[in-house]
Image (spheres, grey):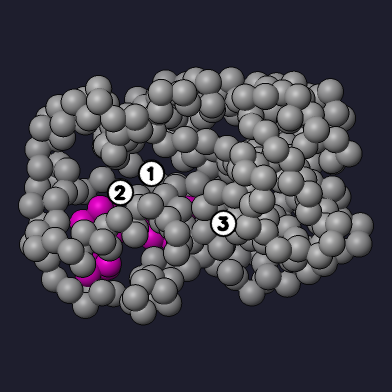
């Protein structure tokens, strides 16, 4: 993480008690570690009885439940000043839909927060969230934001581009294809742009936001320092792995047909039409706004990949 943010993640006896929803996920795990390092006392909502967190005695409590259950949310929020809401899905299942989990889930979070006197909600949304977005994922992220913004509770909303790290399911999936396949498939022309942001740097900014007054009622679009095409990202991965692969372009119309077929029989489907819409839209922003606000400098993709991907 950036050194200047790292310095602000030191422990503080006056840290607020914080609830974290989605603390066991890819991004949530890093956020929880940062908040613990800051000395915050945490209630972490989890489906599991024993999540894999190590913390000083009394600093972290696990609450069994989900965003679908307002009673468990209220237990999790009891005595907490702030709530980090990171729960989300990237593809629908038979029981978890974008409307139920993302939009309606945020409404239940707000309701429980109001009843428990929570002072601030910090929400992990997505770059591209808007009412008229092409993808349902982005539409429901926007709807979730509206529940929070109009709740009367203070808030900070983060809209990241693609988030990558050791356990991510995007860069690592591409790396697996480069390692294992003689050719790498690319949907469409591969010129759609993304702005990968390293998970530890995103979470450092998110964690610091629990203490900074200037983050009140703010929405931050978060991306790394490079706007890269999908093809450029593939090139970087091949360079880090020291492997060259031929790229085969798959027409978008064929990919959409395949995605529609997979959605009929697989929940979640490995590729969905909604994901293809997000891909076509791209995911870029002005990264300098967050860098200036928090006094950070985000890392280029290749720099971080060399640290962990090139060693495998």
Badge 2 density bin: few <14, some 14–19, many ≥20, Cα 10 Å: many
Q: Between residue 245 and residue 196, name the one nearer to us.
A: 245
Find disc 2 in the rendering and name its residue: 193
Say which mark, if any, is on residue 224. none
Residue stretch in magenta = 222-238
* Quadrant of res 118: top right
For marks 1 and 3, give the CA distance: 16 Å
- Asked if residue 232 can be seen in this view, the reply is no
Q: Earlier in the sequence, mark 3 or mark 2?
A: 2
Find disc 3 in the rendering and name its residue: 202
At numbered mark 3, what does the secondary structure look like: helix, strand or loop? helix
Badge 3 density bin: few <14, some 14–19, many ≥20, Cα 10 Å: many
Badge 1 density bin: few <14, some 14–19, many ≥20, Cα 10 Å: many
Residue 107 horizontal/vertical position (percent): 65, 21
At numbered mark 1, what does the secondary structure look like: helix, strand or loop? loop
Residue 60 horizontal/vertical position (percent): 78, 54
Q: Earlier in the sequence, mark 1 or mark 3?
A: 3
For marks 3 and 2, give the CA distance: 19 Å
At numbered mark 2, what does the secondary structure look like: helix, strand or loop? strand
Residue at 78% x, 69% y is 10
Find disc 1 in the rendering and name its residue: 283
Residue 178 in the figure: left or right of residue 62: left
Please state which of the two labelled residues, at mark 3 or mark 2, is closer to the viewer: 3
In the rendered image of this protein, does residue 108 appear above or below residue 286?
above
Say if the magenta span includes residue 303. Answer: no
Asked whether the residues under the numbered discs 2 and 1 touch, taking CB atoms below 8 Å apart as contact, a structural biologist would say: yes
């Amino acid at each position: 993480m950036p050194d200047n943010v790292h310095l602000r993640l030191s422990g503080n006896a006056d840290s607020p008690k914080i609830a974290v929803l989605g603390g066991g996920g890819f991004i949530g795990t890093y956020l929880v570690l940062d908040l613990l390092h800051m000395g915050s006392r945490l209630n972490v909502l989890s489906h599991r009885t024993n999540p894999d967190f190590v913390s000083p005695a009394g600093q972290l409590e696990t609450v069994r439940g989900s965003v679908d259950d307002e009673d468990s949310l209220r237990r999790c929020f009891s005595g907490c000043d702030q709530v980090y809401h990171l729960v989300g899905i990237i593809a629908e299942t038979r029981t978890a839909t974008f409307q139920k989990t993302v939009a309606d889930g945020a409404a239940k979070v707000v309701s429980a927060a109001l009843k428990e006197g929570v002072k601030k909600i910090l929400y992990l949304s997505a770059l591209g969230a808007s009412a008229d977005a092409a993808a349902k994922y982005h539409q429901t992220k926007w709807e979730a934001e509206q529940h929070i913004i109009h709740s009367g509770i203070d808030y900070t909303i983060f809209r990241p581009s693609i988030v990558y790290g050791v356990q991510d399911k995007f860069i690592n999936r591409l790396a697996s294809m480069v390692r294992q396949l003689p050719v790498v498939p690319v949907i469409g022309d591969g010129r759609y742009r993304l702005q990968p942001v390293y998970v530890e740097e995103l979470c450092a900014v998110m964690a610091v936001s629990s203490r900074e007054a200037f983050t009140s009622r703010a929405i931050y679009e978060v991306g790394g320092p490079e706007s890269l095409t999908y093809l450029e990202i593939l090139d970087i991965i091949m360079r880090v792995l020291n492997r060259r692969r031929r790229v085969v372009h798959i027409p978008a119309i064929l990919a959409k047909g395949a995605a529609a077929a997979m959605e009929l029989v697989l929940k979640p489907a490995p590729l969905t039409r909604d994901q293809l819409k997000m891909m076509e839209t791209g995911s870029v922003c002005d990264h300098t706004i967050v860098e200036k606000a928090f006094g950070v400098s985000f890392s280029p993709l290749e720099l971080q990949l060399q640290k962990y991907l090139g060693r495998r």
